[in-house]
Image (cartoon, helix red, strand yellow):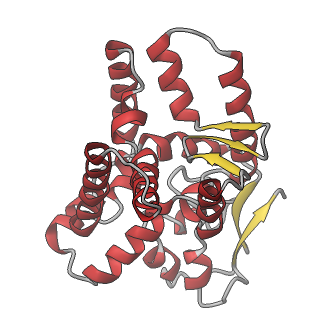
Amino acid sequence: MFGVIALFLLQFLRVKILVGGLTGSLAVWFVKFMDIFAYFESLIASMDFSATALMAVLPIIGIYLIFGRAFCGWICPMDFLYEMTDKVRGDKQGAMGDRAKKISPKIGYIIAAVFLGLSALLNIPFFTNYISHLTNFFRMLTGGVFFAMNLPIEPAVFFYSAGVIIFLLGLEYFFPRLWCRVLCPVGKTYGLFNKVSLLKLKFAEGQCGECNLCEQMCYMGVKIARHIDGPGLRDTNCIYCGRCVEGCGTKGKLIKMKIGG
């Protein structure tokens, strides 16, 4: 995660390896990337097909066909910020956090559809422009860099984006991973690729001692045990963070992340 952000920060020093942000970027001067949900929002909002946008989203589709929802566990800056928030909170999540765990992740697809509907109604990519953690994180980051470099910034944009990120951190404090598990349409879109991606969790069949340590380590609420005797785990909420592998008492002998096979 830090490496990717560092590559983006280099653009402010005129080293253009990655230009833009995590919803849309240009790599090494000619390879364009565009977030899948942002693409669909833009397409629905404009009702205008763009071959350029399609060519930018195809590499991302290719990446997720290989790695599934690993972006959320390895690249998304909110995962790191949420881990820091979790450390501040400790085990004091209380009844509200317990209730949040019972909310069905499937509600997220309804939320994604609502945002797509708003985009069509308002003719703007509503989530990507105003709500997206990725958009607002990079706006806030850019504002901070501009301020440090004594360059002009737009205070209203900076404080709005900072407010969105602070709100999401507050949400994490009281309702752990509710954003990631249920509310984030970007994550819900990526999660669909888990069903077909080359990367998946594999288990040593018939050797599990049913200690349940893997599920206790999973902050995404994935019911890992029910997949133990199957061909592999393809849950849409798995972000391949590796916590279950670390939590298993066998230290990776029974649970492994594997590409193919």
Q: Residue 93, located in which quarter of the rendered image?
A: bottom left
Left or right, residue 171 beside residue 7:
left
Q: Residue at x 32, y 50 (%)?
A: 158
Confirm whether residue 222 shows in the render: no
Where residue 114 appears, x then y in whole percent? 33, 27
Q: Is residue 179 above or below residue 92?
A: above
Q: Residue 132, located in which quarter of the rendered image?
A: top left
Left or right, residue 166 beside residue 252:
left
- Between 154 and 199, the residue placed more toward the observer is 154
Where residue 121 appears, x then y in whole percent? 32, 13
Quarter the N terminus occupies: bottom right
Q: Residue furthest right?
A: 261
Q: Residue at x 56, y 53 (%)?
A: 235
Q: Is residue 184 above or below residue 261?
A: above
Left or right, residue 134 beside residue 70:
left
Confirm whether residue 105 shows in the render: yes
- Between 3 and 40, the residue placed more toward the observer is 3
Where residue 169 appears, x then y in whole percent? 29, 63
- Between 30 and 16, the residue placed more toward the observer is 16
Q: Residue at x 28, y 82 (%)?
A: 88
Q: Residue furthest top?
A: 48
